[in-house]
Amino acid sequence: MLVVSLSSTGRADDGADFFEKKVRPVLAEHCYSCHSTATKKAKGGLQLDTPKVLLKGGDSGPVLAANDETSLLLQVVAHDPDVPAMPPKGKLPDAAVADLRRWVKMGAPLPAATTQLADGTAARQFWSF
């Protein structure tokens, strides 16, 4: 199990920032049109646009395993011959694939979510595997 670590300032480490700056833009540009909660029927049952659905995976099972370079997500974007190539119309730029690989090696940290508690205060939750 992976838990996003907290620094002494109480903020998520730079892994969540890396996700926001490098990973989410790649997913948004190249994946969300077919794999998001906004689509009527996500292809392969896979949605990638919220932590909950990203961690769930799709019809082929989980696509992400923290610290595991054999994660299905990395295989499909690398266009490995044993899996469907994604995106299907052409390979991602090498830098984007490298960023996804680096993110997985970092433990695939995801940004924090803020939940409103019954007393009106906000509680920060950190996504974990």
Image: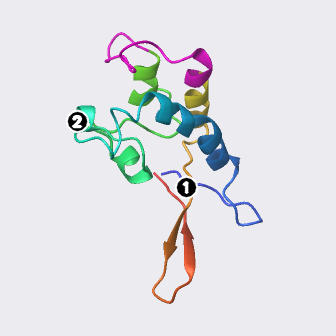
Label 2 element class: loop
Q: Where is residue 34? Give x, y as percent.
A: 33, 32
* Vertical position of residue 89 compared to residue 125: above or below: above
Residue picked out by circle 2: 59
Q: Main secondary structure of the magenta part?
A: loop
* Vertical position of residue 53 compared to residue 27: above or below: below
- Give the mark nearer the N terminus: 1 vs 2: 1
**Is residue 85 part of the magenta span, yes or no?**
yes
Report the span colored magenta.
79-97
The amino acid type found where label 1 is placed reads: Val
Label 1 element class: loop
* Vertical position of residue 116 compared to residue 113: above or below: below
Residue picked out by circle 1: 3
Q: Residue at x 64, y 57 (%)?
A: 5
Q: Is residue 26 left or right of residue 60?
A: right
The amino acid type found where label 2 is placed reads: Asp
Q: Where is residue 35? Give x, y as percent.
A: 34, 36
Quadrant in the rendering for residue 118: bottom left
Q: Where is residue 43? Give x, y as percent.
A: 26, 32
